[in-house]
Amino acid sequence: MRLTLASLAVLALALGAPAAHAATLADTVAAAHAAADQFVALAQGSDASGKPPRASDPAVGRLLDAVFDVRDLPADATVADMGPVSDWLTSANRIGQVYVLAGTGQTDAAKAGADVSDQANRNMVAYAPELGRYMDTEMGLLRLESQAVADAIAQHPELLSDPTRAKGLADIRQGLADAMTGMVTSLPLDGLTDSWREARMPALLGLAPQAARLLTPDQAAGVAAQAKEVAGATGDPTLKGELTAFAASLSRPAGS
C-alpha cells in the first residue's frame, strides 16, 4: 500500500472568498489535527512492537472518529478551502502510516523502502477496519481537492503559465494518481474480505469523476488499467462491476 499526500501549497491558487462552510470545516480540521496528535502519541513504539492502538478501545475509537468521519464533507470546495483540506489529509495520513508501518521499524512512509512491503501488506489485513476508514477518508478529501483545483484551472488557465504553479499541479496530479493506484492495488490482497473490498468502492466511485478532470489522460488511463486488471481477477461480481464502472468514470470528466 502506498501513502501519498498531494501538495497543495505549491500550487498557490488562492482565488475568491472562503466558502460558506469554511468556519465549520476549520473547526472539524482543528479537531482532526488534535486527535491525530493524541493518536500518534499513543502509538509511539508501534513501529517496533507491531501493536498500534486499535479502534476497539473506546478512547482510540473516539480519536479515529474525529479524523475519519467524513460523512458531512461538503459537496464541493473552493481553492480557499484547500489549506484546511490539506491539513485534514495530513492528519489522516499520520494515522494511516502508523497502521501500515506497524512492526516494520519505520515511522515515516516517505522514507520506507521496498523491504517493508510484505509487512505493510500483512498490516493491511490485520488492521483492515482502521485502514479501510483511512482509505475512505483519503479518497473523500482527494475528491474535494480534485474538484477545487480542476475548477480553478478551468476558470483561470493563465495561472499555469507560472512554472512554480505548473510544477505544483504536476505534483498534485501525481499524488492523486499514486493514491488511487495504491488503493486499487490493495484490494486483491489475500485475507481481505469481499465485503471489505466492496465497502471501499463508494469513496473510489465518488472520487473518479473529479479525478478524471484533473489527471492527465495517461495518468487516468494508468489507474483505469489497474482497476480493470483487478476487476478481471476477482470472483466477486459486485466488485467486478464497481471496478469496471470506476475505470469507465476515469475516462469521462465530470459533467460530460
Image (spheres, rainbow, N blue to C red):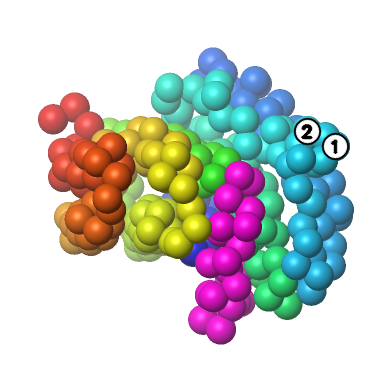
Magenta segment = 109-130
Relative to 62, is 107 above or below? below
The quadrant of the rendering that contains the C terminus is top left
Give the quadrant of residue 197: top left
- Local secondary structure at mark 1: helix
Residue 181: image location, x then y, percent: 36, 58
Where does label 1 land, which residue?
A: 59
Relative to 162, is 204 above or below? above
Relative to 246, is 173 above or below? below
Whether residue 78 can be seen here: yes
- Local secondary structure at mark 2: helix
Is residue 205 toward the left or the right of residue 53 in the image? left
Residue positioned 68% across, 28% down in the render: 28
Q: Amino acid at mark 2?
A: Arg
The disc label shown at residue 62, or none: 2
Overall secondary structure of the magenta stretch?
A: helix
Whether residue 158 can be seen here: no
Relative to 4, is 128 above or below? above
Residue positioned 61% across, 44% down in the render: 129
Residue positioned 51% across, 81% down in the render: 114
For the residues bearing labels 1 and 2, Cβ distance under 8 angstroms: yes
Q: CA distance from mark 1 to mark 2?
A: 5 Å
- Nearer to the camera, 239 or 8: 239
- Nearer to the camera, 8 or 253: 253
Q: Amino acid at mark 1?
A: Ala
